[in-house]
Amino acid sequence: MSVHLQLDLHDLHKDLLSMCAAVEDMIHRAVDQLSSPSMEDTRRLMSEDTDIDRWDVRIEESCLKILALHQPVAIDLRRITTVLKISGELERVADLAVNIAERAVGLLDGPSVQVPDRLKDMAARAVDMLHRSIDSYVELDSKKARLVCTEDDAIDETNRILIGEMIQYMHQSPDRLDSLLHLFSAVRQVERVADHATNIAEDVVYLVEGRIIRHAKKLERLDTKA
């Protein structure tokens, strides 16, 4: 590896880690708003989301510049493509942070509803998955990344249960429909945070092991049937 490529990769790594920290802070604050909505903090999150968008573009431009100048191969090429993909996932998580905060604030203007403890627990687990997927990238630990991937099914099941409960509440309390719709949307947004955490973990496995495990379960089932 040339010295110039090594320096460029180091700068790219630092930039992505800074973006990781910023997005993780955003999603923590957004989830906290499910218990304590704040219009002021929601506005701050919206402003920070614009900064994340710029960050995402800057990282993509850096990746393309490195690819054009250095034509990296093997692990260096995998690192660049992984950074490019993780940056995109983080940008989407930042969008979800704003959406969750907006749904929480929306509860302030409608009929009073209780945010289910199951939703708060699901949100905490999704944020923890994101944190550990980022840690797996920092530590280049594919085992830790694979563990994150195994937890997505549990989040999906909790999402299914909560959606069923929301629909039931809507039938039972049509006068609280607007507030329940905000909660319904928040449930879906939280589930997507877990999806993006899983995607990041899958990218880490690719970086470390050179294996693409995305859609692995589905493809195995199809191969078995064939």
Image (spheres, rainbow, N blue to C red):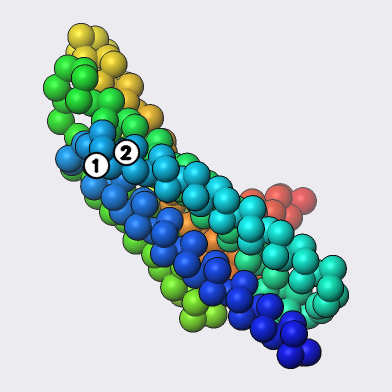
Residue 46 higher or lower than 204, as above or below: above
Describe residue 66's horizontal placement relative to residue 190 as left or right.
right
Question: What's the residue at 78%, 80% (across, down)?
Answer: 74
Q: Is residue 205 visible?
A: no
Which quarter of the rendered picture does the N terminus lie within? bottom right
Residue 72 higher or lower than 1, as above or below: above
Of discs 2 and 1, which sits in the foreground? Answer: 2
The answer to whether mark 2 and mark 1 are in CB contact below 8 A is yes
For disc 2, the marked residue is 42
Task: Specify few, some or many for label 2: CA neighbours under 10 Å numbering under 14, 14-19, or 20 or more.
Answer: many
Question: What's the residue at 24%, 10% (across, down)?
Answer: 174
Q: Where in the figure is residue 84, as x and y percent of width and height?
A: 66, 61
Three-letter amino acid code at the position of disc 2: Thr
Quadrant position of residue 102: top left
Regarding mark 1 in the picture, which secondary structure is present there?
loop
Q: Where in the figure is residue 82, as x and y percent of width and height?
A: 65, 66
For disc 1, the marked residue is 33
